[in-house]
Image (cartoon, grey):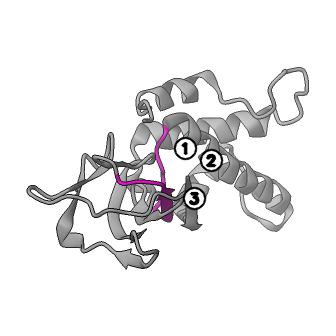
Amino acid sequence: MIETTVAPVIDADLLALVLDHVKVETGDEQTAYGDLVEAYLEAAIGRIESASGRCLFTRTMELTTDAFGTALIIPVSPVISVASITYVDLDGVTQTLSSSTYSLINRLETPAIFPVHGAEFPKARDYPGSITVTLDAGYGEDVADIPSQLRMAVMQTVADWFRFGGNVATTSVMELPASARHACMNFRRQWA
């Protein structure tokens, strides 16, 4: 299981880009529209992250698993860094794995943690959640760090929802526009 422990901060420049894209000014009379666009932006980022399999803005996450195996496959990307790996040893004591004993490989496409050459992962207690990996994932903290296709997918999604927010004729609420969905597929990978 993987979960976010420190949520990302959405770059204010992205909000400004989206407000400009949907032609909403931020004056007193437009505050309600600005708030609506901001809510759509947060939801759109979540949908684009799900569809693309990529974390747009930096956040801290924890992966818990039951065993080391040959490698620890990380089901998010891109991974910026691994902060720590803790495990419950055979005696039931929580230990921290030394960072000199493992390496993050292929941090963008299929992030995985392997023991360094000549080393092995230690024996861990065979119990659900006995291994915890704390990591930072995402493209960065600035909108410029995000690939342009994914930035545009977010902007297109917000614009579509903003324009057609009252349309109840569709069977799917908050569906991604086709162009945004296609942009996300360029980044999608098969999760292990």
Q: Which residue is mark 3?
A: 3
Say what amino acid the circle numbered 1 marks. Glu
Label 3 SS: strand
Residue type indicated by callout 3? Glu
Contact between labelled residues 3 and 2, with CB atoms less than 8 Å apart: no
- Magenta residues, start to end: 53-68
Between disc 2 and disc 3, the foreground one is 3
Q: Which residue is mark 2?
A: 46
Q: Write down the residue under mark 1.
A: 49
Q: Are marks 2 and 1 in contact (CB under 8 Å)?
A: yes
Q: On screen, 144 above or below 134?
A: above
Residue at (57, 58) in percent of width and height: 3
Using the image as rendered, state which of residue 88 and residue 97 is in the foreground. Answer: 88
Is residue 152 on the magenta stretch? no
User: Where 33 sits versus 109, above or below?
Assistant: below
**Residue 80 appears at what percent x and percent y?**
33, 60
Q: Residues within 10 Å of mark 3 (few under 14, many from 20)?
A: few
Q: Which corner quadrant of the image does residue 90 belong to? A: bottom left
Q: Residue at x 30, y 48 (%)?
A: 71
Image quarter (top left, top right, bottom left or bottom right) of the C terminus: top left
Residues 87 and 21: in front is: 87
User: Residue 59 location in percent, x, y?
Assistant: 49, 64
C-alpha distance separating marks 3 and 1: 14 Å
* Mark 3–mark 1 CB contact (< 8 Å): no
Q: Where in the figure is residue 9, as x and y percent of width and height?
A: 56, 67
Q: Residues within 10 Å of mark 2 (few under 14, many from 20)?
A: some
Q: For this view, does 12 lie left or right of residue 87? A: right
Question: Badge 1, how many Cα within 10 Å: few under 14, some, many 20+?
Answer: many
2 or 3: tag closer to the N-terminus: 3
Q: Given the image, on which type of amino acid does mark 2 rest?
A: Gly
